[in-house]
Image (cartoon, grey):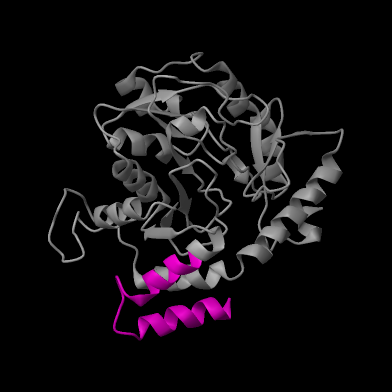
Amino acid sequence: TPEDEAVVLTCLRSSHLTQGPEVERFEEALAEQAGTRCAVVVNSGTAALYVALRAAGAGPHTRVWTTPISFMATANAALLTASQLVFSDVDVTTGLVGGWVPAAQFFIPVTLGGNPITLTAAEQQKTVIVDACHGPIALPVGATAACLSFHPSKHVACGEGGAILTNDETFAQHCKRLRDHGRRPDKRMATLSMNFRLADLNAALGRSQLARYDQNLEKRREIALNYDEAFDGKVETVPHSLESARHLYQILVDKRDRVQEKLKAKGVGSQVHYHPIHLEPFYRSQLGFREDQLPCAERFAERTLSLPLYPTLTEAEQE
């Protein structure tokens, strides 16, 4: 929008292009939106997951449990901490994690498509780092942190960016050290890390976009409801709660690839969210995963298709 362009231009003309006042302002606005004590912004959703896991103590002697139905960054972040990664199968109708791994100390649930997470009492006994890159912008009860993405397809976009939401101020300070080469506020290096900082330009754009978050959320829900009414009794859809951020609208169809080709021929874009992580070439060749290990996840992935869903989608286009 013109407002987005104006804040970026103001930042471009200022004395700060990298870490400056816009970063702190964006963090304050995110924490207010989420109702959390702290928000720590970083340069991607992937970085948010990695930094949060590191800050929470994930490492060579820990097991991290998550779902194979997500973007690969969810699992990759755990591997990059040198943790042992454990997948559990999913609910074949929702794609949400449906298993239980008692030996895992860490749990990364995923808000697939924007479906919010409600943690059970047993799950809250683990260290929970929520992959909330699909939204909503919230910290579930019992979670140590929730990680956000500001990729252009997300509810709040700033080119590339991410954030960690938490109520633990000590944890937040650790995240801030890890995003800046492991440096303390006095700029002396206390631990080994890399550069995961978000530039002021991106933070300015993100803060401007955040001002429209609630409005865009309502529009997404309205579009999703239109699909629900049109498909009722005709097409199987992935169910969502009323609190869903509706990042995705997923249908479940047999012969999915043929349906996708027919949509493409009509000029309608669609995507698959997701091909199972455990069947990615790296996971098969380097970690020994194979087909039929997680049958519900594989069946869900064979049938899922995401239809257009974004705030500027018109009724005519949706029809």
The residue positioned 29% from the left and 42% from the top of the image is: 54
- Closer to us: 286 or 86: 86
The quadrant in which residue 33 appears is bottom right
Q: Which residues are magenta?
A: 1-30
Viewer-closest of 296 and 115? 115
Left or right, 128 with reference to 191: right
- Name above or below for residue 303 compared with residue 5: above
Assess whether residue 18 is covered by the magenta stretch: yes
**Extreme residue in the top direction:** 292
Q: Is residue 231 visible?
A: yes
Q: Quadrant of the N terminus?
A: bottom right
Percent of width and height locating residue 215? 68, 66
Secondary structure mainly formed by the magenta segment: helix
Asked if residue 8 is positioned above or below residue 50 in the image, the reply reads below
Q: How many marks?
A: 0
Q: Residue at x 26, y 33 (%)?
A: 59
Task: Give me the residue at 60% from left, 38% from top.
Answer: 118
